[in-house]
Amino acid sequence: MHSNASSLPHSASVGYRFTTLADWLDWQVTLHPKRMDLGLERVAAVWERLGPKPLPFPVVTVGGTNGKGSCVAMIEAMTQAAGYRCGCYTSPHLLRYNERVRIAGESVSDEALCEAFARVDRARGDTTLTYFEFGTLAALDLLVRDGPDLAVLEVGLGGRLDAVNLLDADVSVVTSIGRDHTAWLGETLDEIAFEKAGIFRPGRPAIMGQRDAPSRLREESVRLGAMPLQLGREFDHETADAGWIWKGAGGERLSLPLPTLRGAFQLDNAAAAIAALACLRERLPVPVNALRAGLQRARLAGRFQVIPGTPTWILDVAHNGAAAQALATNLRAFACPGKLRAVLAVLSDKEPEAIAKPLLPFVAQWFLAQSDDPRAMSVDRLAARLDEVLPEPAAERFVHLATALEAACAASAPGDCLLVIGSFTTVCQALERFPAHPV
């Protein structure tokens, strides 16, 4: 999944540890003894030597179990429609690592990333950094050097101890709380809410985009001294003819078109995104026409992404129960004239039962597989976990995801649909079949 990196010009590569993006990324995986090492001490110490304080532009940090990417994409599109330069840091990527850092709607170049990696490498001294920490510092360095009007940062995992949380965001958003990454964040929704709430800051807006969020999320926002703004309380939305209405504090009402991103749940994400921008309106006013344009321009690869053809492909990175339930809602509203087949491959720390159950009413045939990701759940373990969940006849098993995709495609007839789900890696392998399709 690394970029096909080109070499840097010789003058730019003098003193660099590596000269290609692929080499930098392969090395970063080996730099720290653990793939994941939650905590801010090391990354904050390196940033102290690398970056300015305070940042010269407002920062919105977006966390949550599901909906983070959608919220970021909508904030980006709406601010760009207003004429602002928006810088974004998101993860993970689908096809190219460069997707993680976008400035003014464009992914940064291999050369810019390599230069940022070299600066991080010099600043870290003998401090070891994880792959995600190294990339986060490089992204922040690139954003600071570009100087956009706004930076929108997606939390990688949890919130409280995530590398993105080394910055004090002007506005923090938690889109939703669900069961995911339980080995790191806790088994209960309240424990997970505590970790997610760690991105809130005293005296600053804490946007919560879920009506029925665990009570601890709001309790933590109050305990931390933040300004809680929750969907269904301080702001809300309602449907209207051919669109919807965003309702803010003090009776403010905005009439808006439906987002291009599919699914009724996207109204919650859109409402949270607009609430975040409303909190910044004195520094960064976004007129309602830009909000409307942004909602209709926002795109996000791999989130109920439909690629027409025979069969029609539906790609979704859903990798937990809540995301699968949202996907089921989308499938209910989607017209598939023939049969729907599903190819499922997940990572080893996921709960495949929670992913499969909401989709049972829609899927006529299951193809279970193992992706190329080193963290992938083996297909035998996946099948065993789903043995009592999936209906007879038993699902077909494939050691290689590519083979499963071929088999599911071959089994399809005109009018059929092919759903590919389970992880970013799974969707990435499917997307590679469509090199001309925009990501």
Image (tube, grey):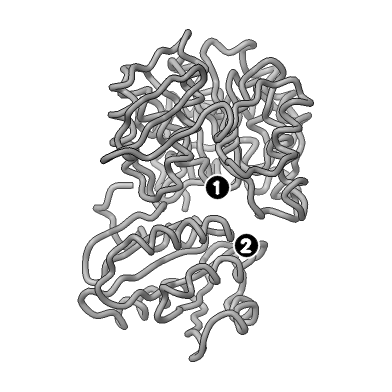
In this rendering, the count of numbered labels is 2
Q: Nearer the viewer, residue 260 or 83?
A: 260
Q: Are marks 1 and 2 in contact (CB under 8 Å)?
A: no
Indicate the position of residue 351 as horizontal and vertical percent values.
64, 66
In the visual, does 103 lie left or right of 292?
Answer: right
The residue singled out by tag 1 in the image is 66
Tell me the quarter of the picture where residue 305 sits: bottom left
Picture residue at 21% right of the left edge, 66% below the top: 309
Number of the front mark, 1 or 2: 1
Type of amino acid at the residue the image marks with label 2: Arg
The secondary structure type at the circle numbered 2 is loop
Q: Residues within 10 Å of mark 2 (few under 14, many from 20)?
A: few
Against 44, residue 404 (above or below) is: below
Picture residue at 55% right of the left edge, 47% below the top: 66
Against 303, residue 60 (above or below) is: above
Residue 229 shows in this picture:
yes
Residue 9 shows in this picture:
no
Indicate the position of residue 434 as horizontal and vertical percent values.
28, 59
Q: Nearer the viewer, residue 48 or 121?
A: 48
Tell me the quarter of the picture where residue 319 sits: bottom right
Indicate the position of residue 306 as horizontal and vertical percent values.
30, 57
In the visual, does 83 lie left or right of 63?
Answer: left
The label on residue 375 is: 2
As drawn, which residue projects farthest toward the bottom?
393
Tell me the quarter of the picture where residue 80 sits: top left
Type of amino acid at the residue the image marks with label 1: Asn
Indicate the position of residue 191 as horizontal and vertical percent values.
77, 46
The secondary structure type at the circle numbered 1 is loop
